[in-house]
Amino acid sequence: MKFVLTKILSATSYATAKTRDALDTALRVQNFARGILQFKARPSDIFVVTYPRSGTTWVQYILYLLTTDGSMEFEHITQVCPWFERSLALGLQTVDDLESYSNPRIFKSHLPYAWTPKGARYIYVVRNSMDVAVSYYNLYRSHLGFSGDFTEFLERFMKGQVQYRSWQEHVTGWEAHKHDNSVLWLTFKELKQNMNACLDSIATFLNLQIDADKLAQVQKHCSFESMKLHEDKFDHITSLLIEKGLKSGQFLRKGKIGEGDKFFTEEQKQRFRNSLQQTKFSGPSLLHLDLFLR
Ligand code: PPS
């Protein structure tokens, strides 16, 4: 009997988990579909589109630097440059929220060409597929709970059984439009080897007048080393924490004695002392014990 009940329990909790996942997915798809139907791209919009791990964040930040005073006030880059489909699918932002962003709006996206809203400007970044696979594998392990080895991941990657499906389909879908006037095609390798030329192409494509000082500033700030110094503002983990209302950097807070005395109001101190006195305890009074801990 116990065996049967255990079986039933595990089968029903598996089914519930499956159903919950399926419902979550359906809700996301519905949110996304509704958002895409409502969203009106502006000619000034800029979509940075890539297959994941191809240099999206790098170009998001470059665009942010080129089109603003470069202030680092934001907690995470998605606050100034939202991840288009994720924001809509998870209901983090509505189309009305996105409407309130001032021009030029900059969006991150990994959508295939067919699903990307039309009528905007697009910067597509492509990266060597083996480099993408290695970077994606590391993200799967560090951020997505994957515990397999690289061989296992590579099998999934080659079959397109990863988020955003097949690298090849994504790239070829966009490559067919690489000469469209609305598309600027960049490679990760060019960004790495000739940032100056890439900044020139971006500025020309977007019709931006950038003086030499600003270009030098952008080049300095978008280096790997400089971005690494501000990694929290680019790491996907930060946006997950913000979504859940959590904060990092607060675990080792101050490490001081006497913080309680400063933080409590007089009224809170009084109520707290009273509650300690009232607690029934057979040893020495809790209030007495607490004095030793100061
Ligand atoms: S994601 O998760 O899809 O948004 O990732 P994405 O931003 O597209 O790509 C992450 C990889 O880009 C590298 N990166 C950089 N390389 C050189 N210079 C700069 N400034 C820079 N910024 C981001 C980042 O390190 C990831 O590559 P790997 O190979 O994993 O280091």
Image: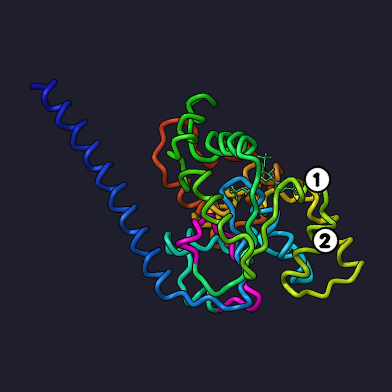
> Residue 225 shows which numbered tag?
1
Residue 248 lies left or right of residue 26; in this view the side is right
Viewer-closest of 55 and 206: 206
**Is residue 84 located in the magenta-colored stretch of the structure?**
no
Camera-nearest residue between 272 and 186 = 186
Q: What residue is rendered at 41% in x and 43% in y?
A: 279
The x and y percentages for residue 73 are: 72, 65
Q: CA distance from mark 2 to mark 1?
A: 13 Å
Percent of width and height locating residue 25: 34, 52
Residue at position x 89%, y 61% in the image: 216
Picture coordinates of residue 237, whole percent (x, y): 57, 47
Q: Which residue is mark 2?
A: 218
Give the magenta-colored segment's residue range. 100-116
Q: Assign a secondary structure to mark 1.
A: helix
Residue 144 visible within the image: yes
As drawn, 71 above or below 8: below
Quarter holding the C terminus is top right
Q: Amino acid at mark 2?
A: Val
Counting every numbered tag in the picture gives 2
Q: Is residue 24 left or right of residue 227?
A: left
The answer, for residue 265, to whether it is visible in the render is no
Q: Is residue 91 above or below residue 11?
A: below
